[in-house]
Image (cartoon, rainbow, N blue to C red):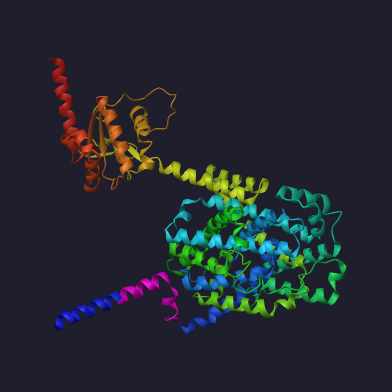
Amino acid sequence: MCLLSGSTGNKAVQKRQQLKRKVKYYIPSFGWIPQYSFSSLGGDILAGATIASMLIPQSVSYASALAKLNPVTGLYAASIPAIIYALLGTSRHLNVAPEAALSLLLGQAVDDIRHDMDNPHSPEGDAVGLSVATIITLQVGLISFLLGFFRLGFIDVVLSRALLRGFIAAIAVVIMIEQLIPMFGLVPLERIVHPSTTLEKLLFLIENMFTHYNLATTVISISALAVLIFMRLFKNMFKKYWFIYRIPEVLVVVILSTVLSAHFEWDKHGVDILGSVNVSTGSSFIQFPFKRSNMRFLRRTSSTAVVSAVVGYLDSMVAAKQAASRFGYTISPNRELVALGASNLAGSFVPGTLPAFGSITRTRINGDVGGTTQMASLVCSGIVLLATFFLLPWLYYLPKAVLASIITLVVFSLLAETPHDLYYYWKMRAWMDLTLVFLTFFFSIVYNVEVGIVISLIISLLLVVHKSSRARMTILGRIPGTDRWKPINEVPEVEEDVSGALIVRIKENLDFANTAQLKERLRRLELYGIDKSHPSEDPRRQQATVLVFHLADVDRCDAIASQIFYELLEEYGNRGVGLYITHLRPGVRKTFEKAGILKLLGPEAIQDNVADAMLRVNMRFRYSAIGSEA
């Protein structure tokens, strides 16, 4: 009785421990918060404060200049999603906040919908912008969450990095053109002319930047950009001095320009300033996002949401993997998707919040400054929220041209790696990758960013499907004087010593994708061998009279592949070709038996190895020769 109760108690303890492990796995904060060491607190606070000093002006810039929304929506996006990610994410250093590229995509969607209104810049237009941002962030969250839930985190491996490079380069050029308009003080004229595409905006700039510019605005924006570039170069020259390297140049320029603007009353000289910012973006701070006022824009914004979710995840995974490799821990792509999805879902409950994802730059700085856990993100979010509610009034006189200069500085960071990647693709003769880069860039500039990324996504996926649909096969030959067979393109001394016999080794599992072209691939091997050749050329080999399949590398064969393989063998059998299968694994044998392949071929066709199969082939040829002589 005591033994029974003791056994039951042990099982209960094991179940509780297993449950705890699963909870810690799916909610990582249950693991790191109880074990948090206060020795890490100093580094995390410094990292959080450093990132916040970057994020506050950047987020205001992204929201107002790129997303065309209330500046406070950027600050909410820099704080609320990051809190949820810190609790659910597997990366210790990833900082989640609004990104320039995604803010631009959202801004283009807002502009497209506002374009149908009589007065896009009215209070009704502002309300529409908040609804569009909310429904896009909601969809981004749902898409990311479901991709993670259904374990589709491998998409960052499937999609080409060249696609992302072309997209980032295009985004950088589009952002630069967009921000040159406020930097030259051409916003009032833009609202009258209303150029829509990037090319139209470029032409608008060329026509008006030297004739209708605002002198004060132009001088302020160019001076701010020059100071930002100088400070960044100065910091890079003194990396070993932490007190210089950690100067937040963006925050310094924002404070200086705000003070100077207030003192010299730049707004009276035609300089557009930030003005009074309403901290509330709706009737209440938190609102249910599935409202009719938001849902009416669902169809028109779905494509933007899909592109934003995919691009945001790709960028986040690059940043998270770099940090994990640098600091020696692992991350889970699927749980990252769930965490990013939950973060954006939470953000959508605050009207107008922008989509938030990880950044390579912020994540790298987080690690450089001393951040060791997700506590740095919580500290950063707390500082940003404090700034939102208490510091925004102090930015009343901040020139909007300075915000445009800040975003223009981001363009240089976006373009920094492009020349290196282009040279690498050229050096490696990766013509398809170069084509993807230029296609994405071309369509993004000529049409819009969404069209460019969608076309490149389709091309990238088609390339993956094309490569996966070609089963890897090779021809085997005998090493002279042995019963060993090796690929004829790998071992020079091997030879095909039985005329008319073709020994094919299939080097991967068979599925519906790669088996569909199996017939054509076998025909080319049969007639042309392993060397590349054009279909119009005359055959270099005679048709096979015996075909031996070496299936040692085939662990799995699905139902459709078995059906296609059956049809292929039946066709060869009708042609009078002798068929043998060797090294058949137990799982595949069961599949072939269910599909009727074993019955079709007969028991003698299944041999343990190639040597046994070739013994049967030689006997068959010998009996054929005797029969023909008789």
Q: Nearer the viewer, residue 134 or 154?
A: 134
- Residue extending farthest to the top is 630
Q: Which residues are magenta?
A: 16-36
Q: Between 373 and 14, which is closer to the camera in this rendering? A: 14
Query: Is residue 523 positioned above or below 97 on the image?
Result: above
Q: Quadrant of the C terminus?
A: top left
* Quadrant of the image occupied by residue 498: top left
Q: Is residue 311 above or below residue 350?
A: above
Q: Is 165 left or right of 372, judged from the image as shown? A: right
Residue 65 percent coordinates (x, y): 71, 63
Q: Determine whether 498 is above or below 14 in the image.
A: above
Residue 108 coordinates in the image, percent (x, y): 67, 55
Residue 28 included in the magenta stretch of the image: yes
Do we see residue 409 in this rendering? no
Q: Residue at x 71, y 50 (%)?
A: 198
Residue 191 in percent (x, y) is at: 79, 56
Q: Is residue 26 left or right of residue 257?
A: left
Q: Is residue 21 magenta?
A: yes
- What residue is shown at x 28% (from left), y 48% (from top)? 555
Q: Residue at x 27, y 79 (%)?
A: 13
Magenta stretch: helix, strand or loop mostly: helix
- Can you tell which quarter of the image residue 571 is in? top left
Quadrant for residue 264, please give it: bottom right
Quadrant location of the N terminus? Answer: bottom left
Q: Residue furthest front?
A: 292
User: Looking at the image, can residue 58 be seen?
Assistant: yes
Q: In the rendered image of this protein, does residue 424 appear above or below residue 283?
A: above
The spot of residue 23 in percent (x, y) is 38, 73
Q: Report the number of discs.
A: 0
